[in-house]
Amino acid sequence: MKQKVILDIELSPARVDWNSLELDRDAPLVAQLEELRDDMLAAKFENGCRLVVGWLPESCPEGSFRVELNANPDVWLPFVVATCRTLSELRRIVLAVAEVARQRRLVHVISADEISADPWLNDIVFDPQVPLEDQVDLLKGTLFDAFIGVWSLSVGWSQPYSPAGEFIVTLRREPASEPARDVDSLTQRRHCFTNWPVVHQVRCRSLDDLRRTVIEFSTMARRAAAG
């Protein structure tokens, strides 16, 4: 008889987007191949962590369950990955990974969706409850790079890994003479955007000020593009 392998409440306080992880524990998995899909469970925790479970390759008898936990809101780069081939082991792994998600204090301060940007780097990851001077290993020289149309938006820390530094938020505009957009030119833009003219630049030392400035700059860029 089929039943939920993981109950939604066991992932609390996560929001369960879907949970079709419903199998017969008394039947061999090879007899349930049609139920073994690559997107069987997905849940999002309040800190932004996303937990997913699937069977890969889908419906393949040589496949296995794959559990992933991702914290990056812009790209899928899971920091926890585990595989198994039994339901008992799957339960143990999912519950353990869910606890990792609950305990994670690091969060992405900004996401691409919030500012309608196309990022290729987002390392603005901090614990909002801990002073920055106690997170110096996260204070990198380059923290965020994204395109918003013909604009580039960047964030860095002026003195990498030193509490004496400050955030630098920079908005640049692509020169009108740049080539048309294609895959090669986008790659080229990522290598040369630091040579574009700086339109606005602000320095700050708090996550609240950083977040506010990034949103303000992205709004400037979008309004300029619309106007």
Image: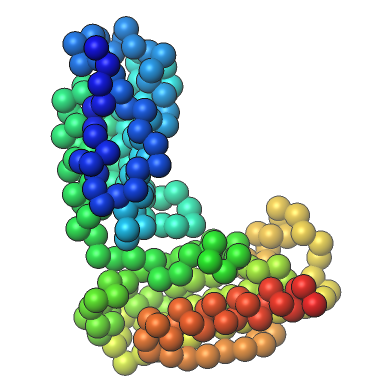
Q: Tell me, yes or no, if residue 139 can be seen here.
A: yes
Q: Position of residue 121 (x, y in %)?
A: 49, 64
Side of 144 relative to 53 (left or right): right
Q: Residue at x 41, y 24 (%)?
A: 37
Side of 169 relative to 82 (left or right): right
Side of 93 relative to 221 (left or right): left
Q: Quadrant of residue 61?
A: top left
> In terms of depth relative to the viewer, which is nearer, 206 or 133?
206
Q: Quadrant of residue 188?
A: bottom right
* Colour logic: rainbow
Q: Quadrant of residue 86?
A: top left
Q: Is residue 104 above or below residue 215?
A: above
Side of 60 relative to 82 (left or right): right
Q: Position of residue 157 (x, y in %)?
A: 41, 82
Which quarter shows the N terminus?
top left
> In terms of depth relative to the viewer, which is nearer, 49 or 170?
49
Q: Residue at x 71, y 53 (%)?
A: 183
Which quarter shows the C terminus?
bottom right
Q: Residue at x 63, y 68 (%)?
A: 147
Q: Position of residue 56 (x, y in %)?
A: 39, 26
Q: Is residue 154 above or below residue 2?
A: below
Q: Position of residue 134 (x, y in %)?
A: 21, 80
